[in-house]
Image (cartoon, rainbow, N blue to C red):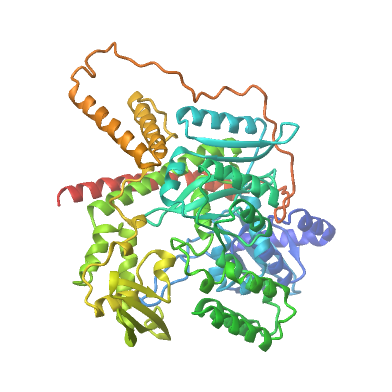
Amino acid sequence: MSNFHAESSEMVQDNANQNSQSNDVMKENHDDNPIVGMIFDSEDELYSYYNKYAYKMGFGVRKSSTRVKDDKKYYALGCHKSGVYEPKTETNKKSKSCKTDCKAKISVIVYCDGRCTISCVTLEHNHAKNLNSLVVEAEGYENLAFDERDCRNYIAKARQLRLGKGDAEALRDYFVRMQKRNSNFFYVIDMDDEGRLKNVFWADARSRAAYESFGDVVSFDSTYLTNKYDMPFAPFVGVNHHGQSMLFGCGLVSREDTETYVWLFKAWLECMGGRSPKAIITDQCRAIQGAVARVFPESRHRLCLWHIMKKVPEKLGKLKQYKAIKKTLKSIVYESIQSQEFEDGWSQLIKDYDLEKNEWLSSLFNDRKCWVPVYVKEIFWAGMSTTQRSEGMNAFFDDFVNSKTSLRQFVEQYDNALKSKIEKENKADFDSLNASYKLMTGFYFERQFRDSYTNAMFKLVQVELHSMLFCNHSLLTTNGTISIYNVTDILRGKRGELKRKVVYTMSYDEIGTDIQCSCHLFEFRGIICRHMMKILIEKDIKEIPVCYILSRWRKDLKHRHYHVINCYEDLKSGRAKQFDQLCSSFYEVAHLADSQEKYDYLLEYIKLAKQKLIDDSSWGVNSNKKIVSEDHNHVPEPSKPLLPPTQVRSKGRPPTKRKESKIEQVTKGKRKRNIWLVRLKLSVGIARDFLCFSNI
């Protein structure tokens, strides 16, 4: 095969020498995809070209071994996931990423005069491509040969939703159909004066019900899918009692300005009954920040820490002392215990490295109370530090959406994605109620948490319990019933090496077993910290007060969204429809009982109705007993056509003329097979678990 490539390349080289001008045109016109016969003046030029192509496509470059024959050098430039993964023999060494034996590559021949040519091209990859995998391979953003914005923009263009002819009307038809199935399905369509689609928001009935239980903290991100009209997909995401992502609605917006986000936030707020989240996490975007301040003035707003820190290489990477600056900055941000400690460290950083004129750092310091951990750790964030929760939801949709997905197809795949989410939540519920982790200690409070919390949350408790072994405490002062302690936390690395020691202050009040820690993990995540556990054991507290067992993480509570029929399935059963309507009516009436008199009145009638249904034997016997009522929730069919949106250029997302690549054609079939296999495995796993638990 190598000889054939060499002979073919020599012929290509002869032809190219006769017409070097056509080769320049070839490189210019095929900037996206390399082709056989392209000639370069040097290896550096070829490598630069292929590296540029690689970052556009979202994969890293790896050079194969070189061999020399007949005064020519042969090697290949391929995907960083080429080759077969071989696990390390030592258990303490873990590979940063797994090889997938990816065949994507170009074969290169270098001639004695330094010129080189591409003799063979394979474009198809056998894995997904994204920026995070590149960062892992490069061991940091600063080692990438391109900046984060370039890659994000290209990946955004590669994941387009194509809004074809009639898609706008199909979207509205879909919303009408969903609302007919469940009257609590909510949607808003924003149109311009000419009847063109501008912005869209929708939320299903189950998401609205779930928000009532888990809507205290919400993450919002608009950096995912775009279509050819530049309409970013913007989901509202929360966390359930298993620590799983939950969708609270999503939108498609035509612009990324403050007014557009105000429209979207108001639509979502109306959908959720006017109840704002207690806390909201967003990207560092001035337009979003302005909209949050206007629509959610009472909500605590936090900027995504991950988004900010990943910009460090881009903003500071060209400075001479970049590595030292980066190390110091990370230490100040992540290790400061008190706000004054952070501010003193920041001032010293600016002074030591002459960064007074750096506008980006100045803006970060001005916004410090919105993103630095030491300023936000006293607020409950349900463990969500960043909008990665939204990005995790975005990645979840990747299994159902590709670059050929139209908007019409997207809403159908959106249904499939949420069905899968429901299945995972149901499985987690079943596992938590029927199996649990073994106890690590004999402390009663550990058993309390195991019996109360879901498996995922109890596992976090056990992590703190294990880390308590590396904590030491000492009594500082005692004032009446209040004792003040110092707890020294000995932090260790993954291999057990000592990293640093941190001293936290503990306050314990004998009255009511009130305990507070300066680490504020309980306030931030809702899990008692290792330092609190240390003092509880010191005080011989066997049973923890219920105030430290959050109902949010309990496994025995039946949340309202459990009773909402999935509107993505056809409700063929009349009984299912009736049950769903009754649950909705009961809930609405319960909210009206906002005083003791109304509560007593409603409860009395419920008792009478319940007794009537139990005692009256005529129910269900006389088939002529029917109640006929009008469907007041009927939504008339739209008559006026909805025009597609105008193409609007949004910042960071320029229009693209990119054609579908071969990999997208290949992965389209593979993705369907993978989804089928995952669902099959999930079904088998649930059945196996059921049989195991039924035998216990």
Residue 581, picture quadrant: top left
Do we see residue 437 in this rendering?
no
Image coordinates of residue 172 in percent, x first then y, are 59, 31
Relative to 438, is 288 on the left or the right?
A: right
Q: Farthest residue in the top direction?
A: 624
Do we see residue 172 in this rendering?
yes
Q: Residue at x 24, y 18 (%)?
A: 620
Looking at the rendered structure, the number of numbered marks drawn on it comes to 0
Q: Residue at x 71, y 71 (%)?
A: 43
Q: Farthest residue in the front direction?
A: 597
Image coordinates of residue 345 in percent, x first then y, are 59, 84
Residue 308, picture quadrant: bottom right
**Residue 270 against residue 519 in the figure, above or below:** above
Q: Residue at x 28, y 54 (%)?
A: 432
Relative to 168, is 467 on the left or the right?
A: left
Give 76 or 199, whichever is nearer the viewer.
Answer: 199
**Residue 75 against residue 493 in the figure, above or below:** above
Relative to 478, is 105 on the left or the right?
A: right
Q: Residue at x 63, y 33 (%)?
A: 167
Give 679 or 419, whichever is nearer the viewer.
Answer: 419
Image coordinates of residue 183 in percent, x first then y, are 47, 30
